Amino acid sequence: MSNEIDFIRSSLPQAQRPDRSRRVDVGGIEVSVVEWGDETSQPLLLAHGGFDFAGTWDLFAPLLAEQGFRVVAWDQRGHGDSDMADLYTWEADMRDAARVIESLGTSKPIPVLGHSKGGGMMNQLAEVLPHRVSAVINLDGIPNERGFTNQVDRSDVNALAAELSGWLDHRRKAGQMSRRADTIEGLAERRKLMNPRLSTEWLKYLVTVGARCDDDGWRWKIDPTLRFGPSGAWRPEWAIPRLRGLHVPYLGVIGTVKEEMGWGTTPEEAFPILPEGAEFHALADTGHFVHIERPDYVAEITNDFLGRVL
Amino acid sequence: MTTTFLEHVRSRLALHELRDGQGHPLLILHGLGERSPSAAPEVVQGWRGPIFALDFTGHGASSVPVGGGYTCEALMSDADAVLAELGPVTLLGYGLGGYVGLLLFGSRPTEIKGLVIEDGPGLDGGGGRPTSPRLLHVSASDLDGSTPDPWAMAELASDIRPPSYAADHVRQIEALSELELAVSVTSLGRPEWLTAILESPVVVESDATAALSTFASL
């Protein structure tokens, strides 16, 4: 490891790389699975958000490992150190999550925690595999009736035309694309545009774990064929009528400061749709990345919750 | 029939020229689990331009992706790769191919010279509104790289096709295509998405031969 990486990582001593890593075959492609904590402890599965990767848990996961959990996270297909896929869908990501749980070698139900898209995925996992899930913790991945924060107004013909043709234009070029090479500082600055509340120190740290160093510079590992933004008919709000039917202990946490990457769900929208008896925290002065902005507090309420319900 | 292959994202797509001709091309999009016909079907015998047919990803002579992940949007982009190759075309879509054709028309409204939607496998998909989610499963022993890919069969028979989503696309066609008749529905099948687009003035129920004759003159 170079001195530069050492220096950047040492600026965040509380962040810890995982204790173990392995690869899991999810049907012809492999995903990277990482773990923090004692291998014999109670497993806790973490699901990252869209365009994130397992390394984004480096601040939060060690705090739960310290509390006695075997914290398990994986890179979704095309993200982080997992293989790139030919095609991507929410449903394929769901299947991969189930394969990661199978790889834990236990048939007992386990608690699952997800951030953003990962939170939405864990909501669905508790519905499709209720016998494998003992608790759900959702970090700023609770849907609302208005859909995504950044979605285009579909009644605006020109805006929708730009989105639809833009997606196809991207696909026409995607086979030959690679992520843009840059310095560590450059990648951190670009990520800050989408993660404006996160510190430059943290974003530079993320570059050292979520990007690779090629001859011409650093580039994010994420599959260049993936494109940020909603496409297709699927909408997060489809989950709303089903959330109350989850008969599993449920902890919902949302940040109250709206952000580009967030779902923009307000406390007034979130709480009424959660399962009966759900615990709910709306964090003041906190954005979408609740576990990165306030790792200690979110780990504390997570640990308290799991201590009561498991 | 001559076949060329288009490299598109991570797929190798088989594009078959069924017949040469004078005028703009007709592109046939097959149904779920099908492959392109080896000869021009009866309904297009009056078409004077060249006639092409595309095998979607995971179908016919096209490549099979690993690990599934199919969406109608990905198939729409397969067909868009043909637009990049041939320029403007008229579309004839069967079942799934009809829905994919609508999505492409709505996304490239100035590059499609009419769409005919015929009956065929995969016309409905998973219906018009979200139902209980489930984890799809395909036996590893069935994944031998042959077509049709079992993941395509499973995923594209269960994807949700909201009427409002189809209506959004037909509204783009109305606003941007400048065609008075843009979509001809000849299918007996009437999934919710298809019923929704029939409310548009540019979508009509008609005979396929008559519609193709109109589209040929565009």
Image (cartoon, coloured by chain):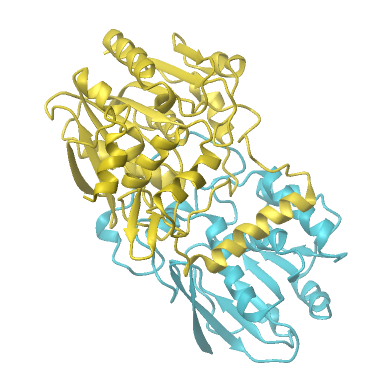
Residue at image x 77%, y 75%?
B212
Residue at image x 53%, y 76%?
B36
Residue B170 horizontal side relative to residue A305, left or right: right
Residue B99 horizontal side relative to residue A280, left or right: right
Q: Quadrant of residue A128?
A: top left
Quadrant assignment for the N terminus of chain B: bottom right
Residue A100, position in %: x, y?
A: 26, 40
Task: Note whether residue B76 is visible.
Answer: no
Residue B207, position in %: x, y?
A: 78, 69
Residue at image x 77%, y 64%?
B184
Classify A27 as above or below B7. above
Q: Which chain is yellow?
A: A
Residue at image x 69%, y 43%?
A152
Instruction: Return the residue found at the far left.
Output: A40
Quadrant assignment for the C terminus of chain B: bottom right
Q: Quadrant of residue B98?
A: bottom right
Foreground of the two, B86 or B45:
B86
Q: Colour of chain B?
A: cyan
Task: Note whether residue B47 is visible.
Answer: yes
Residue B188, position in %: x, y?
A: 69, 58
Residue A71 horizontal side relative to residue B91, left or right: left
Residue B62, position in %: x, y?
A: 44, 73
Total label count? 0
Q: Quadrant of residue A83?
A: bottom left
Foreground of the two, B2 or A157:
A157
Foreground of the two, A76 or A15:
A15
